Structures are given as structure tokens and as C-alpha cells.
Image: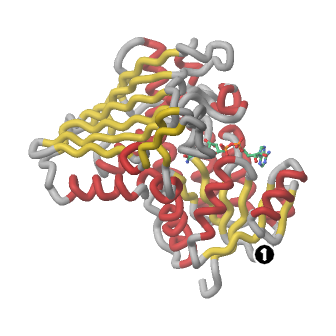
Amino acid sequence: MDKKVGVGLIGSQFISSIHVDALSRVSDSEVLAVMSPSEGHAKSFAEKFHIPNHFTDLDKMLAMPDLDMVVIGAPNYLHCEITLKIAKAGKHIVVEKPLCTNLKEADLMIDACKQANVKLMYAEELCFAPKYVRMKGLLDQGALGKPVLFKQSEKHDGPHADHFWDVERSGGGVTMDMGCHAIQFFRWLHPGKAIKSVYAHMMTSVHNDKTKGDDNSIVILEFEDGVVAVMEESWTKLGGMDDKAEIHGSEGVAYADVLQGNSIQTYSNKGIDYAVEKAGNTIGWSYTMYEESWNYGFPQEFEHFVDCVKNNKQPLITGEDGKAVLEVIFAAYESAGLGKKVMLPFKSDVDKPYKLWKK
Ligand SMILES: NC(=O)c1ccc[n+]([C@@H]2O[C@H](COP(=O)([O-])OP(=O)(O)OC[C@H]3O[C@@H](n4cnc5c(N)ncnc54)[C@H](O)[C@@H]3O)[C@@H](O)[C@H]2O)c1
């Protein structure tokens, strides 16, 4: 492709603001349009980020001939139907995590994109986070020896929008929302090795008034070669976002903290304007992030996806990866429901994973 990759955004709130910022740092791309169902939101987003076109009708945006790639930043339950429409319009797709809400939808999305000959790129930014990329490099060069145990955790005090709390629209609680990051992170660290079993413990410990989903979970995955991965997810951790990982090997160990490890340790009697995602009260001690989006790998992720579209390359993470993550999520909810280990491959016709837990 000789021209810049023309991009359309779907959604105008939290993650779409990160997408537009990330894309502004990718010189081979230009954001040409944004679509969001509320006219006011689409318009103000377009004005704020100098996007030349805004729509409330997806079909109208997809009719734009200059669009090459569309980025889905809409709630989980819409990922499948929106993907099918974009594929039909012949545009490449970046879909936010989790891929969708069930395995049947995952197959529909993968098949539709194959048939339309468009790329289905699964947005898992942790595979581009500079600190995690460096950490994986330590493992790959043998500095840590043979891997034994991986750990990854994401924790904050709960999502910012209603659709995350509503399991009918999200599909599940924190395991679905944040656990999907850990699962793809482990698969990326240990490529070519299948996950053999899943054991999960889930709780709704604090937010019973808001959700039927899990707000805390611990999940243990076992790879076919015996490597174990432990993920801890929380929607009840106050004081700002946590994102951490550990690799334990036969010859070494590595600890990485994406946020607190890079931040400015700050004490303020008055509080500060913004410290870190979901920091809440910033009076007293807090950790002030800088270049938060870069530290998470969002611009790097979009640099890669734009390169894949412009130069017809194979994406690092695809719809198939998103489906594999979803399979582990389904197995985790089944395990939490049964109170025992669940073996993979795991198939389920259930339309939302949380239903396997709260049968
Ligand atoms: N990668 C990450 O770390 C990360 C972080 C946050 C959210 N996400 C994912 O991004 C997606 C959106 O989350 P968010 O936090 O931006 O939510 P949000 O509520 O902040 O924004 C959702 C947007 O979707 C739009 N929308 C609603 N219905 C729509 C429709 N029918 N068609 C098109 N757009 C519609 C809304 O108008 C809104 O602009 C979710 O799937 C979430 O899991 C990923």
C-alpha cells in the first residue's frame, strides 16, 4: 500500500481515547473517522482529536472507500456483530480484548474474516509493553534457564462503565475482563506449548450490589510441558491499577511491575490531577505515571497492526489467539463452578462464560 493506512474508530470513550492517541504516534496511519451511537459523543470526540468524519451509523462509516482498518472499542457483546459487518465491507479489523463473549461467536468472526480476506487482529497490548517485551527477551536468551513458573496479575477497584458489571453484556467478571490479558501474556511467553489444564477459584466478594460476575479470581494454568502459570485478578483493589509479572526459571528469576515500577512516588496533602488509571483519591502517597499508554505498549501495538495492513504481514496476535484465550476463560469458569481442575481442549455451547460458574 503506497498511502497511509486509513483508520476508522468504533467507540468514543475510554479505550477509543487510548486508540486515537496511540495512532497519532504511528506515522503510517491516519484516523479518518469515528463512529459512536450518540451523536454528541461522536462529534465531540472528532473535534477533540481532529478527526475529519464522525458517524452514528456504522454502515455509513464502512462505506468510506479510504478506510483500510477499523478498530473496535465497543462493549464485549457487540464485538462479533460489528466484526461481521466490517469483514463484509472488506476492511481489516483490530478488535479489543476479549475477542467476544462465546466460542461460537469466535468461530463466526474468524471464518468471516478469512472469507473476506481481511486480517482479524486481536488487541492484547501486554505483548507490546516495553517492560514485558524486555522480560520475555531475558527468557528467550536463556538468562533465566528453563521456565518453571509464570505469574501475572492485574488489579484495580472496578470498571468505569455499566456494561462491564452486567454479565449479560460482558460475559463474565474480572476473569473475563482482566484475566484475558494474563492468558495471552502466558501464551506469548511460552509459544507453541498448549495449555493442558485450568483450575480456578472465583469470588464476588465486595461488589455483590453491582454484579453477578466475579470480582476476584485466582487461576492456575498448566502447560503441556509442566510449566505452571498463576494469574490473580481483582476488581476490589483500591489505590490505582496494578499490572505485574514474574518469571521463575531454573537459572534465574525476573520481576516486572509495569506501573509502580516506573512511576514517581508522590506524596501530596492536596491531591494531584491524575496519577494513574483508577487511582481514586490521590491525597497522601500515590504513584504518578508518565507515558502510561507507551508503558502499556499501545502505540507499539498499533505500529505493528498498521504495518501488518500496509505491508500485508501476519499479525503477532490474531482471532485464533483471541479464541484460545476465550477457551481458557470458559474452562476457568467451569472449574470455579465445579471446584476442580478442568482439562483442555474445552468446548462449550454456553453463550456466556459466567453461566458455567453460577449454574
Ligand atoms: N486493552 C485494554 O486494556 C482495554 C481497556 C479498556 C477497555 N478495553 C475493551 O474495550 C472495549 C470498550 O471498553 P471501554 O472501556 O472503552 O468502554 P466505554 O464504555 O468507555 O466505551 C464504549 C464505547 O462503545 C460505544 N458503543 C456502545 N454501543 C455501540 C454500538 N452499538 N456501536 C458502536 N459503538 C457502541 C459507546 O458509545 C462508547 O463510546 C471493551 O471490549 C473492553 O474490554 C480494553
Colour convention: secondary structure
Choose between 75 and 264: the one closer to the eye: 264
Where does the C terminus fall, quadrant-wise? Answer: top right
Look at mark 1 in the image and give the residue it sits on.
Answer: 65
Q: Is residue 80 visible?
A: no
In the orientation shown, which residue stands out farthest toward the right?
Answer: 39
Where does the N terminus fall, quadrant-wise? Answer: bottom right
In the orientation shown, which residue stands out farthest toward the bottom?
Answer: 2
Ligand 1 lies in quarter: top right
Q: In percent of the image, x 49 and y 50: which residue is there? A: 289
In the rendered view, would you say 140 is above or below 211? below
Secondary structure under badge 1? loop
Choose between 148 and 224: the one closer to the eye: 148
In the rendered view, would you say 359 is above or below 299? above
Percent of width and height locating residue 237: 50, 26
In the drawing, does residue 300 fall left or right of residue 140?
Answer: right
Q: In percent of the image, x 45 and y 55: which residue is there? A: 295
Badge 1: residue crowd in 10 Å (few <14, some 14–19, many ≥20): few
